[in-house]
Amino acid sequence: MIIQRKEETKVVLTKPFSLEGDSDVDYKAPNILQRILSLFKNVRPGSDLTRLQLPPLFNFPKSQLQCYGESVYCTASDLLSKCNNGENPLERLTSVVAWSISTTRPGTFGVVPYNPILGETHHVSRRNLNVLLEQVSHHPPVSALHATDEKENIEAMWCQQPAPKFYGTSVEVQVHGKRQLKLLNHGETYEMNSPQLLIRILPVPGVDWVGNVTIRCPETKLVAELHYRSNSFLGFRGNQRLIKGKIYDSLSSKILYEVDGHWDRTVTVKDTKNGEVRVIYDAKEVISGLKTPTVKDAMGVWPSESALVWSELSEGILSKDWEKAREAKKVVEEKQRDLLRERESRGETWAPKHFIVSHSKEGGWDCSPIQKCVPPAPIVVPI
């Protein structure tokens, strides 16, 4: 945990989720399963949980915006450079597959991040990579991400809409929206989606990523299809976290590589032409020993910064002062209601500061950054 002051306010930054699952908080609270079951006792199966109000006991000290951002800027190795430095389109797509897998991070059963408030931002830099996120809608919750590395000439854009639903013995969170990674030196854009998060309550509690991810490059016509597989329903067979898939040429439908492995261990590709197998992703190398970001320029931190907006609540959770945490959460939420009433009374419509938002033809959301490049951030990741 790192707490740094900006005049009379505090910026609270906590450890990113790493492979070891270490944290600034001990979440192994007694009777956590009973508490979760009591939380859902009046919720019907199939219900949308986006408006469910959770007490701080069920939060970890971090906003959902920070979680999205950490999956991009918190890495122990520079996978984005590898994407850019691939000698040919196939090697670059293979590196993009590895980078996409690296954004899949371990979860903790029984706790979830804060729901970002409207207009909340998160702005962090790691070396030449500058990352900016903004909450562009509250109901439904939609988060936009823009990341640029001017040295490598790389740009990433996400538009994420999590949709959690309760199914009696589990909660399934579909993450709608698209992700783009642009390798501008090569004139290539890689479009991909996110796996869905499965929170199993019974019979064996656990958190895992499941579902299908497709990564395609319209310019090269190469496609990767990945399938994230969870444990069995009863929790047997140990920790699976399997990934199976293929990389193929969409013009000829010829399979070039077979993908196999575990997203929390290693992932390999097998060349279908000569049978050669090699490791393309090692989770231990990429998401182990991750460092907590620090504040480099306290005066440059925006009032909308996640680590500032939720600082009092995070302090309450970290110290397990639940009364302080409840009051802090109430203050943030009531302020948002007051701002909404003020806008409605003036007939004003809120607009994002950093993104242009529109509805896509498919019925989802499109978020386009206003600025071409993300500026360096006042919060940095130590190298």
Image: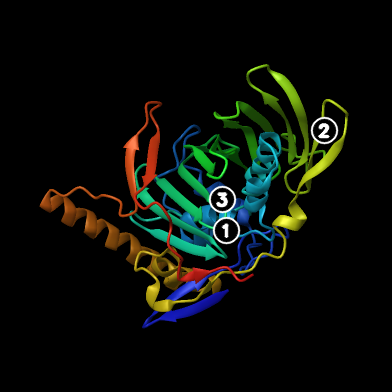
Q: CA distance from mark 1 to mark 3?
A: 31 Å
Whether the residues at callouts 1 and 3 have beta carbons within 8 Å, the answer is no
Amino acid type, mark 1: Tyr
Q: In the structure shown, which secondary structural element does the residue marked by tag 3 occupy?
A: helix
Kindly identify which residue carries mark 3: 36
Q: CA distance from mark 3 to mark 2?
A: 42 Å
Q: Using the rendered view, name the quadrant where residue 120 is placed.
A: bottom left
Depth check: give the residue in front, 272 or 11: 272
Q: Residue at x 78, y 30 (%)?
A: 258
Q: Would residue 58 be visible to someone looking at this image? A: yes
Q: Position of residue 79 (x, y in %)?
A: 66, 52
Whether the residues at callouts 3 and 2 have beta carbons within 8 Å, the answer is no
Kindly identify which residue carries mark 2: 270
User: Left of 252 or right of it: where is 126?
Assistant: left
Q: Position of residue 15 (x, y in %)?
A: 60, 67
Q: In the structure shown, which secondary structural element does the residue marked by tag 2 occupy?
A: strand
Above or below, 146 relative to 297: above
The label shown at residue 73 is 1
Amino acid type, mark 3: Ile
Q: Residue at x 66, y 64 (%)?
A: 290
Quarter of the N terminus within the rendering: bottom right
Q: In the structure shown, which secondary structural element does the residue marked by tag 1 occupy?
A: helix
Q: Would residue 206 be visible to someone looking at this image? A: no
